[in-house]
Image: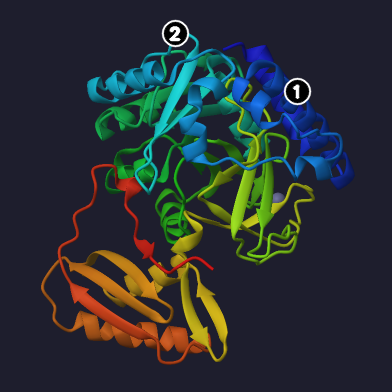
Amino acid sequence: MNLLKGLLDYTRLVFHRWYPKKRIEAYQLKELKKLYRYAIAHSPFYRDLYRDAPFNSISDFYKLPVIDKKRMMDHFTELNTCGLVKEEVSDFALRRETEKAYLQYYKDRYVVGLSSGTSGNKGLFITERELTERLPFVFLARSGIPLRLLPFKILFMLRVFNQGFNDINADFISLSYLSTMEPVDRVIQTINALGINILMAPPSMINRLLPEVRRITADIRLVVTYAEVLSPVEKDRFKEVFKTEVIEIYQASEGQMASACRLGHLHINEDLVFVELYDAEGCLIGEPGVVGHRMIITNLVNYAQPLIRYEMNDMIVLDEPCPCGSKFRRIKQVLGRHDDILYFRRGDEIQYVFPDLFVRWIIVTSDDIREFKVIQHRLNEITVDLDLLVPNAGIPDLLKAKLLRELAAYGIQNPEISINLKRIELPREKNKFKRFESHLPKD
Ligand SMILES: [Zn+2]
């Protein structure tokens, strides 16, 4: 990775976020058109898909067909612009997983991401190596890391480590990479030996470090998390244990969705992804606090595998404008999937409850709750599976009373709550575990 190029990115990225709204929109339109033209020229799939779909104004863009993961995967070979064959890329990705040989680039040029997804449908995502190598600079530029932390001594941990990530060393910035597959001992040794002051890692990795935090002698001044949803409870815990600010970056296989500003608030990376949010009636959502029905994104920077008007399973809820001054839309909440929200009756209306609120109610009930799972099949009815550290027959009643009380405070009367004590086995990939499962019919 060329440090100079990285710094140019850094400057450009810092600059974009201060654009006024009109200028952001103009920039997006320009980039969308560029991508559309490129896709038609280089992707047989898009050439066919857009045959009768001209794109001159933004309203034309909103009329382009929407694709989803299944469609993208069904047409992987014709969709990508590099002539990559689905079966071969898939073989490569699976072999890499089984051999744990994460250090390889595909054809020495592409980073291949594999996502299993909650519904079990596999997704393959390819990115040009060069683009991936610029990622830390995106993170840095957007993370609002205060300059008083100079020189930055960053440890950047990735689930899938790529050899091409060369460590960067300059007077004011050193950046070292480590795989999250590394044992905790090795991670702590690295942090201490390099005098790391900025720790960047997925929440599950930070969780693994928590019991050993006494052994960290380096002065960590900032923790940055990404790749998985950071719950407010975890964020508070990390803050307390590391005695430092914790900021979040929201990254999906489909793109670098959002980064936190200097105030710690998440903003959509409007210059990297174009995000459309729709309500159940198909109207664009612009106002804060509304839980959408569909989120459609376009990755503005990935030309190897253009994702244009691609429907995500995630959902974001917008927040009020941020006092930091950036006009990039601010995110109040990232929901793993839009059906993860719980729905109850409030008089004649429907009241939704965010999972993180529910998590808080459950975990404060008892320290003996090892794991839990909340399942909803019908409106106003939920089942909670509880796995306890030690047998305690009183906890289900305590929890039920707590939930009823909290829900009543939101005007939710007489919800049906059943609580079962049972052993909960976590899947091997912990971040794939769904604590909330909604089986409510859509609409
Ligand atoms: Zn902000």
Above or below, comparing residue 243 to residue 43 in the picture: below
Instruction: Please tell me the numbered disc located at residue 107.
Output: 2
Image quarter in which the N terminus is found: top right
State the residue at coordinates (16%, 68%). Answer: 422
Q: Nearer the viewer, residue 415 or 183?
A: 415
* Residue 301 % position (x, y): 66, 27
| Mark 2, other Cα within 10 Å: few <14 / some 14–19 / many ≥20 | few
State the residue at coordinates (61%, 11%). Answer: 2
Q: Judge whether residue 309 can be spotted in this image.
A: yes
* Residue identifier under label 1: 37
Above or below, comparing residue 150 to residue 266 in the picture: above
State the residue at coordinates (43%, 52%). Answer: 238
* Residue 312 % position (x, y): 54, 46
Under mark 1, the amino acid is Arg
Q: Nearer the viewer, residue 50 or 236?
A: 50
Q: Nearer the viewer, residue 219 or 175?
A: 175
Disc 1 is placed on an element classified as helix
Whether residue 21 sits left or right of residue 238 in the image: it is: right
Under mark 2, the amino acid is Lys
Above or below, comparing residue 175 to residue 326 in the picture: above
